[in-house]
Image: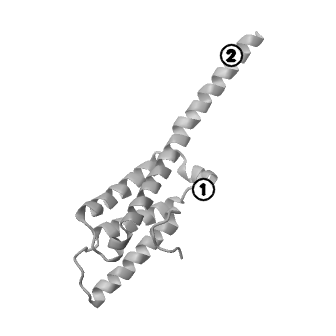
């Protein structure tokens, strides 16, 4: 009987461990990987973003990142609880960052033109990049506030 109990206990620990890994830890790792990829893209395109001179492909990539980050967040069960335990960004912070990403992707990106409206848009761009970095806890090439 002791052998049977040992086998059942071992099997149960294995099954519950695999469930925890598959249902919680794998989605968290994928979410963090996506945040790392976003940080990489923003650092790589930092100069172009500040100059408001970004290629349409990069604009599309930003929209895709926005949707993928939201999808990865949704795949984490009990996100609010797990975010507190594993130090993930708050749900509202993720949404704010995605709104800022969407603004950046939709911002008018034309060639160099020096006027007051353009410089205001560049300041707004820097503020949005800072908001993304602060909200998601990633480096975007802009100093944190």
Crowd band around label 1 with a 10 angstrom C-alpha radius: few (<14), some (14–19), many (20+): few
Q: Quadrant of residue 43?
A: bottom left
Q: Residue at x 25, y 66 (%)?
A: 55
Colour setting? one colour
Asked if residue 133 is positioned above or below residue 82 in the image, the reply reads below
Q: Which residue is drawn at 37% across and 56% down?
A: 65
Q: Do the residues labelled 2 and 1 touch (CB within 8 Å)?
A: no
Residue located farthest toward the right when viewing the structure as drawn: 2
The label on residue 87 is 1
Position in image of residue 70 (x %, y %): 41, 54
Q: Earlier in the sequence, mark 2 or mark 1?
A: 2
Residues 73 and 39: in front is 39
Residue at which label 2 appears: 7
Q: Quadrant of residue 96?
A: bottom left
Position in image of residue 15 (x %, y %): 59, 26
Asked if residue 116 is positioned above or below residue 73 in the image, the reply reads below
């Amino acid at each position: 009987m002791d052998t049977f109990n040992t086998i059942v206990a071992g099997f149960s620990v294995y099954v519950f461990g695999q469930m925890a890994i598959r249902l919680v830890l794998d989605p968290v790792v994928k979410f963090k990987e996506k945040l790392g990829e976003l940080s990489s893209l923003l650092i790589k395109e930092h100069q172009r973003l500040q100059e408001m001179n970004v290629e349409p492909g990069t604009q599309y990539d930003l929209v895709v990142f926005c949707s993928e980050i939201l999808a990865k967040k949704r795949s984490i069960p009990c996100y609010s609880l797990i975010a507190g335990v594993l130090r993930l960004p708050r749900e509202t912070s993720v949404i704010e960052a995605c709104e800022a990403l969407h603004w950046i992707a939709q911002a008018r990106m034309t060639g160099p033109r020096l006027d007051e409206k353009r410089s205001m848009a560049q300041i707004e761009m820097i503020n949005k990049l800072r908001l993304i970095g602060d909200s998601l806890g990633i480096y975007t090439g802009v100093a944190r506030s």
